[in-house]
Amino acid sequence: MNTSAKKNRSVSEALNIEVSTDITAGVHDLFTVRYSDQPVDNIIHLIANIPMPSLQSDQIFESWQGAVNSTGAHNEWKLFKNDQYLLACVPQALIETLPIDQAAEKAYTEIFNQMHINDYPFLVRTWNFFSNITDDGYAGSNNYQQFCSGRARAYQQQPLAEQVYPAATVIGTQQPGLQIYFIAAKQAGIGIENSLQVSAFEYPAVYSQDPPLFSRALLHRNHSQEILFVSGTASITGHDTQYAGDINRQTEICLSNIEQLITTAVIEKNMTPVTLRDFSQFKIYIKNPNDADTVRTHIQQILGPSAPVYYLQGDMCRSDLSVEIEALAIIPVN
Ligand code: 3EB
């Protein structure tokens, strides 16, 4: 292969992210996800508007960037693709009238269908949002537990025997409806678990009848990058919530869990050594807006004032959790 062909191939597999805020946008209760094919024509496409208030003075935009944009139109789907990655949001029309477990089952079944049709067989990252997350559903379980059951049923119907679970975020919103956006890939990622935590897919059934099917982090390599997707990470060790009611201690446990995942990725999976300072993005979900200043002060002491940290109001899937942190590292490699 000649050098320029190799280089082009690298570029067309890369995924980048730019997170920006806009104080003039005037809409503080939407978190906006976009895709741009910046090297080509710089057109910015909307992926999703998540009804989740910013805890900053400005609206937050998460813009993914890939080289080759193709917006496939399969029924209601808008699909953003490059040579390695597929990004999309599950169309609302497919799921909007269903109760949460059926909505989750249908959504994941549709995701797997699109992955199959478009030939991106590996699910690497998902973001899931719905309302009343800890409220009672039916059959004695709450809405989060119902969501877990629906997701598990969709997996059970798939021939995904060897597949590692994606990194994931599940956050409660104040607006009705289930919103899911995700990244799938041509090549498999490497699942990373946290030795300080029981793997979520092995949680005891007291948390949910069907286990939460996600990896604590997922390392994905393409031709020019190592991408570490760190799942929504909470103040949990073993499988127990730590420091209910103490926002500072919960923030500390979130960060030490993330540090543990980085160490595991580097030592066990041979990732390029990175620190929290090398990360491209942190999203911090805070349940009580009154805690935002405390968390921000704490985070700035550790990551510095100009780290790419974004604060959003969201509810956690356990009522004793006050904060959850997800993170993303995109490291260029030769
Ligand atoms: C936890 O560690 C916190 O059900 O996909 C975080 C990230 C959590 C993803 C999921 C749940 C999920 O159990 C909750």
Image: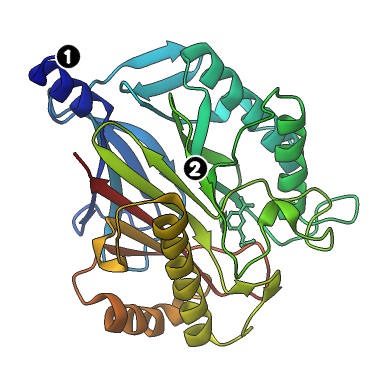
Measured along the vertical axis of the image, is residue 218 above or below residue 303?
A: above
The answer to whether residue 305 is left or right of residue 41 is right
- Residue under the point 53% across and 39% down: 180
Q: Residue at x 18, y 55 (%)?
A: 24
Left or right of 75 in this view: 82: left
Task: Name the residue tied to disc 1.
Answer: 1
Q: Is mark 2 on a helix, strand or loop?
A: strand
Mark 2–mark 1 Cα distance, whole angstroms, equals 27 Å
Q: In this view, does 282 lie above or below 287?
A: above
84 shown above or below 50: above
As drawn, the residue found furthest toward the left would be 4
Sort mark 1 into few (<14), some (14-19) or many (20+) by Cα contacts within 10 Å: few
Q: Where is residue 159 in the image (x, y as percent from the top left)?
A: 70, 22
Q: 59 or 47: nearer the eye?
A: 47
The residue under label 1 is which amino acid type?
A: Met
Q: From the image, which quarter does the N terminus lie in? A: top left
Q: Which residue: 22% across, 77% down? A: 304
Disc 2: CA contacts within 10 A as few (<14), some (14-19) or many (>=20): some
Residue 190: which numbered mark, if any?
Answer: 2
What residue is drawn where x is 71% and y is 32%? Answer: 155
Which is nearer the eye, 239 or 314?
239
Where ligand 1 lies, by image quadrant?
Answer: bottom right
